Image (tube, grey):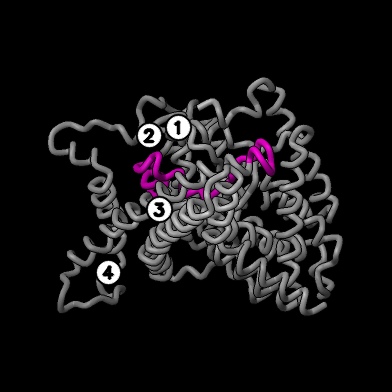
Amino acid sequence: MDLLLNAFIGFVNKFLGQAPLLLGTVVFIGYLLLGKKSYEALAGFIKTFVGFKILQVGTGGLVATFKPIIESLTAKYGIQALVIDPYFGQTSATEFLDTVGSLAFVGYVMMIAFAFNILLVAFRKFTKIRTLFITGHIMYQQSAVLLWALYWVIEGTTGKAVSAPLVVVTGLLMGTYWSVMSNLIIEATQEVTDGAGFTIGHQQMFGAWVAYKLGGLLGNKEHDVNHVQTPGFLSILNDNVVANSLIMTLFVGAIMIILGEETFTYNRANYFFATYIWETCAFFAVYITILLTGVRMFVAELTASFQGISDKLLKGAVPAVDCAVTFGFSPQAPTFGFIFGFFGQLLAIFTLIAIQSPVLIIAGFICLFFDNGTLAVFANKAGGRRAAAIIPFIAGLIQVWGSALVLTFLVGPPEVIGWMGMFDWATLFAGTTILSKYLGILVPIILIPLLLIIPQLQYKRHAETYFTTMRDF
């Protein structure tokens, strides 16, 4: 039994949890189902794997460069708080679950959720679900955090291992969320990506849908943030590389000056502090360029190959992938999202300090850039640069206040160092956790059928084209 369990956990961690390997295999299978030769399918696997690795280099570089600056800003002013960052949330979950002998159950939750997602797509005629969530590392991350949160508020006082009913219910709720929310955002993603043939499978699917719907009310989509024509010398900002470098130098450079030269460790024999600031901020444009290169490579393969899976195995299925793939379709919007989301989070943190909140928050770079950057992409498509500024600012407030609220119910164990912090987790899952504190396991049980009503309502709005949306472009 232990051998089977270890093999199962190994498969979860070493295959399903490795997004490049999982996506490459999906492309390989898709090309074979399309009748491609085996070496063509192998080429598709390699290009997808390498493309996603390039994307990870870009995203990893962004985090490694800018996350310490954000953390230093907080440490400089002596704020002791919890971090709203996906990996801090995941660490809180896995470390705590390990103390109650339940870490292995995260794999069960993930497999139940993925199997339920497949089942809902297979019976799409009845469920109206069209999307298969295949963002592997996010699947594990979310499964861990949700299991930890629900266990703590429902069963945590027992000190025993997570119960089997809670593992099953958590898995079904997780699978429902992946299916329903990635399905909800299909049409908006098609607009954003000019019909690229995929949808978003990440931490802010509901948030992106809200951003797209509200964007048109807040601005004019004709005033696209990527097409701002500026006069005179400002015309250099029409180039994405130049604009990202200069904007981040002004914004992050100001933070670095406030922190002071002594905060940073660098080779002072080779750099003035000013040139060190410039090089650090210019890396933003470097990593964005790397990220976009990876996006273009693997999205092309995924889009072409997934038609085989859609036609042969799961008819009508649409892949739900990492939010960063949308950045290539609106290169300036993520910068807008990062900056205005930062202002929103900063205001929210100062508010917590002012009211002497029992829980204080440290802003996390991943939440600031990837969450708010994605919301800005969708907001910009519907409402232009005005929406791309306003919505991430509001989201920044929500990310901090929602996370602080749910953490008041989760703090206590020393393993808790943060929360996911992304938009959906500061709203939908924060609310689910808090309600479960008072109403128990009944809350996630009721949520499952309630969420499954959403695709039925979507279908009623445009039944004639509902299952052909991905072929309309």
Q: Residues within 10 Å of mark 1 (few under 14, many from 20)?
A: few
Q: Are marks 2 and 3 in contact (CB under 8 Å)?
A: no
User: The magenta stretch spans which residues?
Assistant: 310-339
Number of labelled discs? 4
Q: What amino acid type is highlighted by mark number 1? A: Asp
Closer-to-camera residue (179/416): 179
Residue 110, x across and y down, in percent: 71, 60
In what element is the residue under mark 3?
helix
In the image, residue 9 sits, relative to residue 443, either above or below, namely: below
According to the image, label 1 marks what residue?
194
Q: Residues within 10 Å of mark 3 (few under 14, many from 20)?
A: many
Q: CA distance from mark 4 to mark 3?
A: 35 Å
In the image, residue 193 sits, relative to residue 2, either above or below, namely: above
In what element is the residue under mark 4?
loop
Q: Nearer the viewer, mark 1 or mark 2?
A: 1
Closer-to-camera residue (66/36): 36
Q: CA distance from mark 1 to mark 2?
A: 18 Å
Q: What amino acid type is highlighted by mark number 2? A: Arg
Q: What amino acid type is highlighted by mark number 4? A: Gly
Q: CA distance from mark 2 to mark 4?
A: 32 Å
Q: Residues within 10 Å of mark 2 (few under 14, many from 20)?
A: many
Q: Nearer the viewer, mark 2 or mark 3?
A: 3
Closer-to-camera residue (312/18): 312
According to the image, label 3 marks what residue?
294
Q: What amino acid type is highlighted by mark number 3? A: Gly
According to the image, label 2 marks what residue?
385
Q: Nearer the viewer, mark 4 or mark 3?
A: 3
